[in-house]
Image: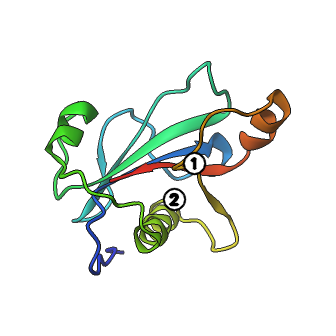
Amino acid sequence: MQLKDQESTLQYIHISIPEILLGHIKSKNSWQNYDQEWSYRLDPPHASHPFQRDLYIIKSKDMKQEDIKLLLDNIVHQDNKAPHNIERAKKVIQEILDLSNNIPIENWLDDTGNRSIIESMIDKNKIKLMDIM
C-alpha cells in the first residue's frame, strides 16, 4: 500500500524499536524499498542497547545509496518537529512496520539522555521516535 504524503516536508525518520516488533521487516542491513515513496534500513544490533534496533526511513523513489550521512547532507534541513510532522512520522512508522494503532510511538526528539538505569530498562520495550527531518 502506498503511503500518501499530504502537505508534509517529512523526508527522514529515525526510530529505536524492540526487536520483537520487527517480524516482517527484511533485516539485510541494506536499504529496502517499501513503496514508490519510502525506503527503510534496519541497523545491526548494538551492544549499547540490547533488544532494540535502529530503523531509518527515508523518502526516496529508489534507494541504492548505503551511506546515511551522504543522504542526510542532501536533505533540506527544516524545523520538521511541528506536531503535524510528528503525527505524519508516526503514521509512516505504523504503516511500514504494520503496527496497530494501539502500539504507542513515543516522541524522544527532545530527549536529553539523562535517565536512570531503571528508566533505561523500561524504555527498551518502547518504540522511540528519535529524529525526523
> Residue 59: horizontal and vertical position, in percent?
25, 57
In the image as oriented, which residue stretches furthest toward the right? 118
Quadrant of image for the N terminus: bottom left
Where is residue 131 shown, x and y percent of the image? 44, 48
Q: Is residue 47 above or below residue 83?
A: above
Provide residue 106's location: percent of width, then percent of height: 63, 57
**Mark 2–mark 1 CB contact (< 8 Å):** yes
Q: Quick check: 1 left or right of 76?
A: right
Q: Which residue is mark 2?
A: 97
Q: Quadrant of residue 16?
A: top right
Residue located beneath label 1 in the image = 22
Tell which of 14 and 116 is nearer to you: 116
Kind of element beneath mark 1: loop
Q: Nearer the viewer, residue 72 or 57?
A: 72
At 45% from the left edge and 61% from the top edge, which residue is drawn?
96
Q: Inspect the image, locate mark 2, and give the three-letter code of the amino acid beneath it.
A: Leu
In terms of depth relative to the viewer, which is nearer, 132 or 3? 132
Distance of mark 2 from mark 1, alpha carbons?
7 Å
- Decide: few, some or many residues near mark 2? Use Cα within 10 Å; few <14, some 14-19, many ≥20: some
Q: Residue at x 48, y 61 (%)?
A: 93
Relative to 103, 132 lies left or right? left
Counting residues from the N terminus, which is met first, the one under dot 2 or under dot 1? 1
The colour scheme used to paint the residues is: rainbow
What amino acid does circle 1 point to? Leu
Query: Which quarter of the figure has residue 27?
Result: top left
Q: Is residue 67 left or right of residue 79?
A: left
Q: Does residue 5 appear left or right of residue 114 in this picture?
A: left
Q: Secondary structure at mark 2?
A: helix
Residue 89 in the image: state x and y as whole percent: 44, 64
